[in-house]
Amino acid sequence: MPVADGAMVVDNSHGLYEGKTPNSAGNENILPASCSPAAEILKNFYHTKRVGNYLIGRKLGEGSFAKVREGLHAMTGEKVAVKVIDKRKAKKDSYVTKNLRREGHIQQMIRHPNITQLLDILETENSYYLVMELCPGGNLMNLIYDKKRLDERETQKYIRQLVLAVEHLHRAGVVHRDLKIENLLLDEQDNIKLIDFGLSNCAGILGYSDPFSTQCGSPAYAAPELLSRKKYGPKVDVWSIGVNMYAMLTGNLPFTVEPFSLRALHQKMVDKEMNPLPPSLCTAAICLLKKLLEPDPNKRPNIHQVMADSWLQLANKNTGTPYLNRIHIEEINHTVLLHMTEKMNYKHSEVLSAVLTNRACHTLAVYFLLNKKMKRLSKKYREMQFQEKKKGEKQKNEYFQTQWRKHVDKLTIPPKQTPVYLAVAKGQSKEKKHRTVTSSSVRSSIHPSINSFLRPSIPSSIHPSILPSFQPPTHKKKHPGCHSIVGQTQNFLYIACLNWWPS
């Protein structure tokens, strides 16, 4: 569809072409040709406006001051998520106006596989744009809504990943303060991705010496000390993890009041009047829930103590290894780096600086999206090769089986025939009658002394086939061999006859 009139941000500081495929004449393709966005993709992507190198499309979510929309990066053809903050609405809230840019700053501090990656930051007169990786798996809330509730094993996986993400934040001195089901997304591999750092804040690094006092977040997920406007620390995130765990296991919230009252809700939390749990839950899961939803922050475990719980099964040698917030130079994809410098006119130092410092800018966005695209295409290529190999083996097996079947089909097994000397004529044909007449004339010329023995036992059709050139004797003298016929049974008459007849 045609691009609608709207805010336009053109970033020409990189000396890049916009929406054009790099000229590869005289050079080999460093990345596959499919890494260049096809004009058809850009044309078919629904969008209402273009901001810089991004097409802004359909709405994915909405908050008080911001909307999250699906975006398309024009240079790579990869989809992104764009959080659009309305500055005019934000001005109505002094806290939001004051901390408008804090979300972007915090997300550049951290890098973790279970936290969404911030790629780029853009700003116009009326809007503030945060470009992030897109999570195609959707919202965890929708999954719970479809299934009514998650089974214990699935919940264990998601809570384990959430605990690892929160531990990484707390290690960096960041408290999220808005951990809820709506802020948990799923990626292509069905892994948790934590989003929305709009209410996050930084505490003293590893010391947490500066407690917070701002009342914020969703009341249903907020810790009792946060609702009571007391000083609080990072353990408010631990409480929120417990509420999320309860919501996954039951499909409901642990503390509810009708009609809603903040005071009544707080009192129910303090009195530990938790809604009933499913009887099928194991003891270890129930024990962890009670620890997480401890109203007294002094008795509530910190995130490192939560990681040691047996139900999460995080006690292994790799769990304690912290995930680095900065990518190591050895982890850089040199194929993508070479493509950006030789095909897209980026400076080598510029790409390294943006990637190694995790600085949200268009350079980081291009690197991240190309790297993601290359991994996806490589995976598809390997799967295609595997399928072709599997198909080839199947065809090979079918070929050998077919050849064997053909070989068997060519075998001609003659029908079972009764030997001539045991054959008994059934319903004689004209030909057989003719043969019978011929054989009878032959027998009539045999010596009269044995003719009476041959007549009842030897079929009349045998004589012409066995003795075609037989000439009856002209003398009347018995052949010496005929004495062996006398006294024999009828079954041996044929043998006796063979002994007598000359060859």
Image (cartoon, rainbow, N blue to C red):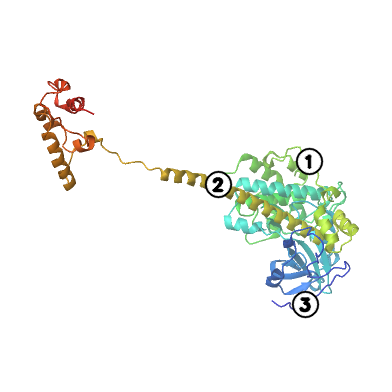
Q: Residue at x 15, y 44 (%)?
A: 433
Q: Which residue is mark 1?
A: 320
**Label number found at residue 396:** 2
Which residue is most to the bottom? 5
Q: Which amino acid, mark 2? A: Lys
Residue 55 rendering spot, x and y as whole percentages: 75, 70
Query: What is the secondary structure assignment of the residue under circle 1?
Result: loop
Residue 147 rendering spot, x and y as whole percentages: 58, 55
Q: Earlier in the sequence, mark 1 or mark 2?
A: 1
482 up-or-down from 140: above or below = above
- In three-dimensional space, the C-alpha distance between marks 1 and 3, rounded to whole angstroms, equals 48 Å
- In three-dimensional space, the C-alpha distance between marks 1 and 2, rounded to whole angstroms, equals 50 Å
499 up-or-down from 62: above or below = above
Which residue is most to the front? 474
Quadrant that contains the N terminus? bottom right
356 up-or-down from 282: above or below = below
**Label number found at residue 6:** 3
Which residue is most to the right? 349
Q: Earlier in the sequence, mark 3 or mark 2?
A: 3
Q: Which amino acid, mark 3? A: Gly
Q: Residue at x 89, y 56 (%)?
A: 353
Q: Who is closer to the viewer here, 1 or 100?
A: 1
User: Can see residue 35?
Assistant: yes
Quadrant of the image occupied by residue 199: bottom right
Quadrant of the image occupied by residue 486: top left
Q: Who is closer to the viewer here, 18 or 116?
A: 18
Image-based side of 268 in relation to 334, left or right: left
Foreground: disc 1 or disc 3:
3
Q: Which amino acid, mark 1? A: Gly
Q: Residues within 10 Å of mark 3 (few under 14, many from 20)?
A: few
Residue 115 rendering spot, x and y as whole percentages: 76, 54
